[in-house]
Amino acid sequence: MSRDALVVGINSYANLSNLSAPSEDAEAIAQRLEQDGDFQVKRLPETVKDGKLQVGKQTQVTLRELQEALKQLFKPDSKQIPDSALFYFSGHGLRVDLGVQEGFLATSDINPEFNFFGLPLRWLRQILDESPIRQQIVWLDCCHSGSLVNVAEADPGERGQARDRCFIAASRDFETAWQDTNSTYSVLTKELLAGLDPTRHPNRWVTNYSLVDFLNQGLQGATQRPVFTNFGEPINLTRSWRETEAIATAPSESDICPYKGLRYFDCNEEDPKYFHGRRALTDQLLDHVRQSNFVAIVGASGSGKSSVLRAGLLHQLKQGRRLSSSDQWKICIILPGEHPLQALAQAFVDPEASTLDRAEQLGKAEGLLKAGADGLRRLIQVSGASRVVLVVDQFEEVFTLCHDSAERQQFFQCLLRALEITPQLCLIVAMRADFFGKCLEQEYSGLAQRIQQNLVSVTPMSAAELETAILEPARLVDLTVEPELVSQIIQDVANEPASLPLMQYALTELWKQRLDNQLKLSPYIQLGGVSGTLQKRATAVYEQLSPDQQQTAKHIFLALTQLGDETADTRRRVLKQNLVTAQHPTEQIDAVVKRLADENLIVTSELVGKSTDQARLAVVDVAHEALIRHWPLLRQWLEVDRDYLRQKQRIETAAEEWQLRDNPNDYLWQGKLLSKAEAFQQKQAATFSLSTTAERFIQQSLHQRRNNRLKLVVLGLIAPLSLTIYVGFRLAEYFRLRPHWETVNSHTEDNPASGPALVRALEALNQSRQSLEGIYLSTANLSGANLGGADLAESDFSSADLSESDLFDADLRNANLRSANLFEADLSDANLSDANLFDDFRDDDPSGANLAESDLSGADLSEADLRNANLSGADLNGANLSESDLSDTISWTEEQLRAAKLCQTLLPAGTNLDPNRDCKELGTEPETLK
């Protein structure tokens, strides 16, 4: 290994005060590098004393001399390129601001009066960027040297390149570098010499990382603190060459498995030791965090996003060796879940506090976050940390698990606005690539644009990186791996996208079957390779369970799968208590969850509870989505039972929301929703048993329905005795409702009624069971209106805004819905037969209604005109589309249409569906169709 060093110590200056320490500093460093680091050292200025080369105390160094020496160090003319190059400088440092701030190393010939300041740091940066040398080391012991490292012109421009770099500066940008009064050396150099002393650790290398640890400890509380930046692998600096190499001992078998199965590598004490192969990506992420306050880590499921985030980036930040003072930063990690704002509040709760204190802290944090970004700013500021790194892992859960669009919008606005008003905040999100399109569906406070501008893609690992990921962890536990096995695994993974968790799982299973502490190819082939290992293991574990436990395992895996709509199925974390049903009691759930967790097929964790009597809540999750994608048995369950699962999850989601809101009657179901839920509970009790929370939700809904009917019966019995009272009541009702009718009838296209007043009027009339047939509401703003069950036949809603409105079971026969906005509207079981949703009056740009994300399950759309309608994400399960016109309909999928009833339907071009399907069910024979 060849190692070159340039050591510079300048005492003599023409136009600045002379110094005494730099030459002493430089000579001591030069001797240490020569004696203990095996460096070939060039001194500048160089003199000869007693036949030995030394750093000159009086000799000057010109800018040209320094530039030539640096060029030869980092871009040598010879074909023999050294492995390592080290540049040490002691002398004056200058920071000049003439409109643009620049840093300089002062040479002897500088003249500030003529704007000549010495060596520009941007010139040094360019030399470093163009240098072919892999290990680059720069130590600067001069005033204001922190700015020399941190400002743009000193940025090494790492950008994830395969280089090892160490940069150390004497002080922060606003500080002066000092000489130690009890020593002939400067403060930084004195500590450098002590830190480089190899006798502190005989037979071990002093590396750039151990050196930084020493400096941090030695200069803690000093008037000046070193600033440093490290990239890449550790760089060996010095060691005691007088000692012989330690005698190698025969490897002993270890009980430590260095692989993670389906779990990600976390940022704990052990996992980062065995996390290898993502060095370049980790460097790239560190570079982004150093320069920006927002980073988006995006990659396919199974590409290793969480591992590189946690065991790579966050581990390095906690170590504090790569970015100066990052070990002093506060790091908060959250998973969004169903309620991301609550998850965000929990990030600021002290997990070590008492139960009462945690409950109080959580309440205060949630209260502050109600104020949005300003509340988050205050939570960050009171933390006392110079920087707070807020990490949102599995960011896609904001779309898959959070069903409240308003809370989702508040969450995004809170985070992104806080970035603008909180300098200490650094936001890091990790998200599956197939969910980036969801970020584009709405403005979301500029989320998509921020992600695009700060994107770090998690691309597949190269063959060399995969080899490192296999071999390095094995080496740490004295485990050997057959070369043929390494080659086969790399070949299998190359043909399987996003299969890193499968590779880790296969290696874990191989470790269990190791012979003579060696992993071999033959057991790997018997296991079925990368993809077959998981399938076989999951199936084997399932088959080892008793019949009752198998049913419980199926129940658990189905509950932990969030069914996709236009995206793939994803994971779904569930409270363990919500897995308990009549068919799957607590004891059975506990036993099966423990078994599956022991086999690394699922993982369990805890959430901080809000109440004092339930401090912690157990949460269950699949170990990785690879299980959902690659286990044939689970895929079979999901495909066969998908419709029933959707109904079950819909009921349980509503029940959990009701429970979360402290069981209010307003959240109970009624009408057809309740009837369908009751029928599902009765028919599917044995196969798809509902959680105890969902059963209680249905029972409470039925209880409320019985109470409402009893009230009607009582009113019916006393009606003959109360005719006079009834007439008076009707007159009073007429005068009570007259202002609402006046508001509705006053609406015209040229003189529209105000949105809120109009909505209140319509809701009051509908609650009083008034018929609204034939009303004129063209262009009206009715967003969020509650008109469930309303009689709106033949009404005019052309160009009206009905987004997020409740039109469940409404009568909209022959209604005019041309160009209406029905985004996320609940139209389940509504009657839309003969409704017109196509604007054929706009010849230049004909358009249809916006039904994106709407619920049309069970709706009657027979003979409806749906041309140019937007059906993106609409639920058409059980909808009647007979004789409707869907030609030119946009943003539809065959899966949506397959769930609907089709008979004589004009389908969009390109479908492979039969338009005569379901005709027998509707009483029409296909052969009689025209």
Image (spheres, rainbow, N blue to C red):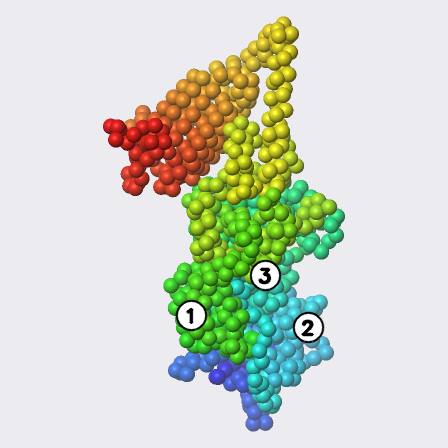
Q: Is residue 324 visible?
A: no
Q: Which residue in the structure is indicated by mark 2?
A: 218
Q: Nearer the viewer, residue 599 or 859?
A: 599
Residue at 58% across, 88% down: 247
Q: Earlier in the sequence, mark 1 or mark 2?
A: 2
Counting from the top left corner in percent of width and height, residue 676 is at 51, 32
Q: Secondary structure at mark 3?
A: helix
Image location of residue 512, percent across then percent down: 53, 70
- What is the distance, in whole Å, between disc 3 and disc 1 at their CAs? 24 Å
Earlier residue among tags 3 and 2:
2
16 or 905: nearer the viewer: 905
Q: What residue type is disc 2 on?
A: Gly
CA distance separating discs 1 and 2: 54 Å
Q: Which residue is mark 3?
A: 598
Q: Residue at x 39, y 31 (%)?
A: 880
Does residue 188 appear anywhere in the picture?
Answer: yes
Whole-percent x and y of residue 840? 31, 26
Where's the C terminus, which quadrant? Answer: top left
> Which of pointers 1 and 2 indicates the residue nearer the eye?
1
Residue that protrudes farthest toward the bottom in the picture: 51
**Quadrant of residue 78 in the image?**
bottom left
Label 1 neighbourhood size at 10 Å, few (<14), some (14-19), many (20+)?
some
Residue in the image at 29% along x and 28% along y: 843
For the residue carrying disc 3, how many other residues have a C-alpha within 10 Å: few (<14), some (14-19), or many (20+)?
A: few
Amino acid of disc 1: Ile
Per the model, the C-alpha gap separating discs 3 and 2 is: 45 Å
Residue type, label 3? Asp
The residue that mark 1 highlights is: 525
Contact between marks 1 and 2 (CB within 8 A): the answer is no
